[in-house]
């Protein structure tokens, strides 16, 4: 009989019980330690709601998560995690050692928000309703993680495997999952066996990672006076041709594949032929082949648009285009019949999960693409208006989300 190193550390008499508990989370809930930890989650929830507000009022705009990260580092140390440190990508990492180093479960939530520097992040509280940018995505995920750490400590829960807690950077927008990419490619390379991300609210379970290509395309030409230099190729008009071609793309509905021109800019005056224009384009799919297909169409559309604009004006003051890849989120999937998904569904149903698996773009995309077992879950409560200034979080029974995350973490750390 060949056993994983973790299982060799467990007396054979207890091995069957350990495996049975891992397969049946209701049995795991009945252990004295887990009962104490689950009770601690509920009693600690008012404190962590206050923490959710406080942390959310620490600005963490794209690429500027340092201040919030320093606070999470302080809290990790306060909760007695081991080897608390901040890696080169700004991820805050702390470890709760189990009976063995493996399996090593990474439990993560992201530090950053979508909101630019200068956004008013003051949180307003109206009864059970919290209102403020980022209050659900992902301030909720951060305090669920903190709540799990504290409950494990107060319940004196011991796990066969290790849990590494991470407050990561760059999940949103052009952050391009840089924090999680760094975990897998550098700071924790080769050390991660399983991965949980807590992102947003509710009791959702996401097992499909929607990949994306993101480009900033710059169109250039010599420019000139709108009257005196008329007849010269125009970068904005070339860009307009490209946008029209993108708008005409035919993409599959299943697997869902999308495209979007999200931002445009350029020009100096209404009476000047511009010397420069730019656009930012986002393309997404959970299917690698479909994503590559729309990416190929996009590149061809930009090339054809420039050629058409130059032909139109007989190559006078020719226009050029330079597509720059500014974001690449890998697509991936954790199969529904995999052990991590089956365990997550079994645990989640105890707390009212509807059983429907979802797709999305989260930190779990990175391990999914690498075929490392990964899942993303919501942090409980009810969230609305994510990525808007009207974002809100209803704290009614929100502790259930943390209880679900706690039970799942312990079930997977074995």
Image (tube, rainbow, N blue to C red):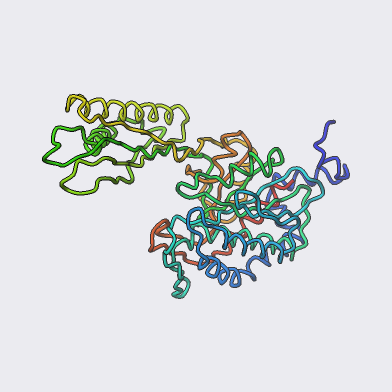
In this orientation, which residue lies closer to the viewer: 258 or 168? 168
- Identified at 43% across, 31% down, the residue is 291
Query: Residue 11's spot in the image, x, y percent?
Result: 88, 45
Query: Residue 300's spot in the image, x, y percent?
Result: 33, 26
- Identified at 48% across, 50% down, the residue is 172
- Identified at 20% across, 49% down, the residue is 269
Rendered view: 124 above or below 33: below
Rendered view: 307 above or below 385: above
Q: Quadrant of the N terminus?
A: top right
Occupied quadrant, residue 398: bottom right
302 sits left or right of 170 in the view: left
283 sits left or right of 333 in the view: left
387 sits left or right of 345 in the view: left
Occupied quadrant, residue 124: bottom left
Query: Residue 231's spot in the image, x, y percent?
Result: 14, 32
Residue placed furthest toward the left: 227
Q: How many marks?
A: 0
Query: Residue 53's spot in the image, x, y percent?
Result: 52, 69
In this orientation, which residue lies closer to the viewer: 74 or 166? 74
In this orientation, which residue lies closer to the viewer: 88 or 327? 88
In this orientation, which residue lies closer to the viewer: 310 or 404? 310
Rendered view: 75 above or below 8: below
Occupied quadrant, residue 66: bottom right
Rendered view: 306 above or below 106: above
């Amino acid at each position: 009989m060949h056993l994983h190193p973790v299982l060799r550390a467990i007396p054979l008499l207890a091995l069957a019980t350990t495996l049975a508990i891992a397969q049946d989370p209701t049995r795991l809930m009945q252990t004295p330690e887990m009962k104490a930890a689950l009770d601690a989650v509920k009693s600690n929830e008012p404190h962590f709601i206050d923490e959710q507000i406080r942390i959310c009022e620490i600005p963490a705009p794209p690429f500027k998560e340092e201040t919030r990260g320093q606070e999470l580092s302080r809290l990790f140390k306060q909760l007695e995690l081991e080897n608390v440190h901040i890696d080169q990508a700004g991820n805050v990492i702390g470890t709760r050692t189990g009976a063995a180093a493996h399996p090593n479960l990474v439990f993560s939530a992201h530090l950053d928000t979508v909101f630019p520097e200068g956004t008013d992040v003051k949180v307003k509280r109206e009864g059970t309703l919290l209102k403020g940018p980022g209050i659900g995505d992902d301030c909720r995920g951060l305090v669920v993680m903190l709540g799990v750490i504290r409950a494990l400590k107060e319940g004196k829960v011991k796990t066969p495997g290790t849990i590494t807690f991470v407050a990561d950077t760059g999940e949103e927008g052009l952050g391009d999952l840089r924090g999680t990419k760094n975990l897998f490619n550098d700071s924790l390379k080769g050390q991660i066996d399983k991965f949980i991300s807590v992102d947003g609210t509710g009791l959702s379970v996401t097992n499909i990672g929607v990949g994306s290509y993101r480009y900033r395309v710059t169109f250039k030409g010599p420019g000139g006076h709108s009257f005196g230099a008329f007849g010269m190729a125009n970068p904005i008009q070339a860009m307009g041709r490209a946008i029209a071609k993108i708008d005409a793309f035919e993409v599959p509905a299943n697997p869902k594949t999308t495209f979007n021109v999200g931002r445009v800019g350029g020009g100096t005056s209404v009476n000047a032929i511009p010397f420069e224009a730019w656009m930012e384009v986002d393309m997404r799919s959970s299917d690698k082949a479909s994503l590559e297909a729309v990416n190929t169409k996009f590149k061809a559309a930009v090339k054809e648009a420039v050629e058409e604009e130059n032909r139109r004006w007989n190559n006078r003051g020719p226009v050029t285009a330079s597509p720059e890849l500014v974001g690449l989120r890998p697509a991936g999937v954790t199969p529904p019949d995999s052990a991590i998904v089956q365990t997550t569904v079994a645990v989640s149903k105890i707390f009212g999960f509807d059983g429907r698996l979802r797709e999305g773009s989260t930190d779990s995309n990175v391990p999914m693409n690498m075929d490392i077992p990964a899942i993303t879950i919501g942090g409980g409560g009810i969230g609305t208006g994510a990525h808007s200034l009207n974002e809100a979080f209803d704290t009614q029974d929100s502790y259930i989300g943390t209880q679900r995350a706690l039970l799942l973490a312990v079930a997977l750390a074995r």
